[in-house]
Amino acid sequence: MQAEAVFPATPKKAGMYESFYLRAVAPGEPVGVWVRCTVHKRPDERARGSVWCTVFDARKGRPWMHKLTSEGLSAPSDAWIAIDDSRLGDGYAEGKCGGARWSLRIKAPEPELRHLPSGWMYRARLPRTKLTSPSPSAIFDGTFALPDGRTLELDGWRGMVGHNWGAEHAERWIWLHGVGFAEEESAWLDVALGRIKVAGRLTPWVANGALGLAGERYRIGGLGARGLRVQESTEGCMLSMPGPKGLRVEAHVRVPSASSAGWRYADPDGGEHEVANCSVARVELDVALPGAGAPRRLTSEHGGAYELGMRAGEAHGVEIAPFGDG
């Protein structure tokens, strides 16, 4: 898994954020974990790190959530990021947050996914958010102990490892990740969609990502892709996403009732977004491959991660956790 922390080389005068994260979902029940190790730095201030921990169980409704913020932030030689006792690196994650403890081993059968289609876009000022998935389809083993005494045994749980960074969040965004498809166990989807403000106006949606299917990787979206259609709410979404040579992926996502985690994300300039994330969502894909005839359907009952980010203050119906950011 190729990844490297950006924050150690950020000039003191600059503001930025960075996030390394993982999600894993049980194969036979709607239970999942989502852990983020993040950096937040305002201009001319010292960077601080936070560990965010969410455990989903759609049978119980609202997820268990906690967050720890510390100045004990580093990028050691054996990990991408470390915050106090929590570390996330190539092939492993370990840590603790709010009484939860985890020790995970991560296998990465798929190489890194770079969502942005050109290398220069990772060096340019725009887009102001950069993202990659060091492992767009990962396999997790290990333990995740909860404060109530339960211990989740991760034995071949599927998921992903992600990395993003930038000077500010998009004005509005969707992140969709899918694994655990009944029709093909190794299939996966990892796509991010965003809208930004330019000269005070909100741009159309732009999608970037990929679909992994039958050992092939199919790129989705891009700046020049036409025909992208988006209907979204915190309860789910419908996406119709184009790709090269006539590829089209239609995604229908449904969030189980009251199962979303609500978080507050801060921009380095002081602005705030609110985020609804459900990592046990139902995902149904209709995939039209170039030259393959009728679309192929893929279904995952609870293997989807669906995140919707929006400006703070918008009415969305998801309770936001009582943890500040920034």
Image: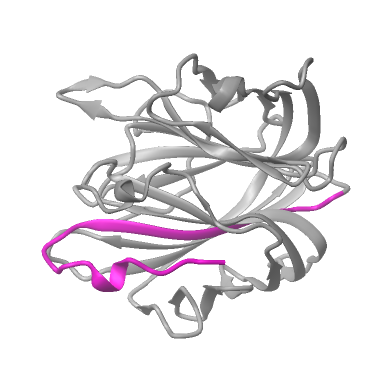
Q: Is residue 92 left or right of residue 151?
A: left
The C terminus, quarter of image: bottom left
**Is residue 16 one of those drawn in magenta?**
yes
In the image, residue 231 above or below residue 26: above
Residue 234 location, x and y as percent?
55, 27
Colour setup of the view = one colour
Q: Which residues are magenta?
A: 1-27
- Is residue 308 visible from the viewing direction of this image? no
Residue 182 location, x and y as percent?
87, 37
Q: Nearer the viewer, residue 224 or 76?
A: 224
The N terminus, quarter of image: bottom right
In the image, residue 136 above or below residue 311: below
- Is residue 30 visible from the viewing direction of this image? yes
In the image, residue 291 above or below residue 23: above
| Picture mark count | 0
Residue 229 location, x and y as percent?
51, 15
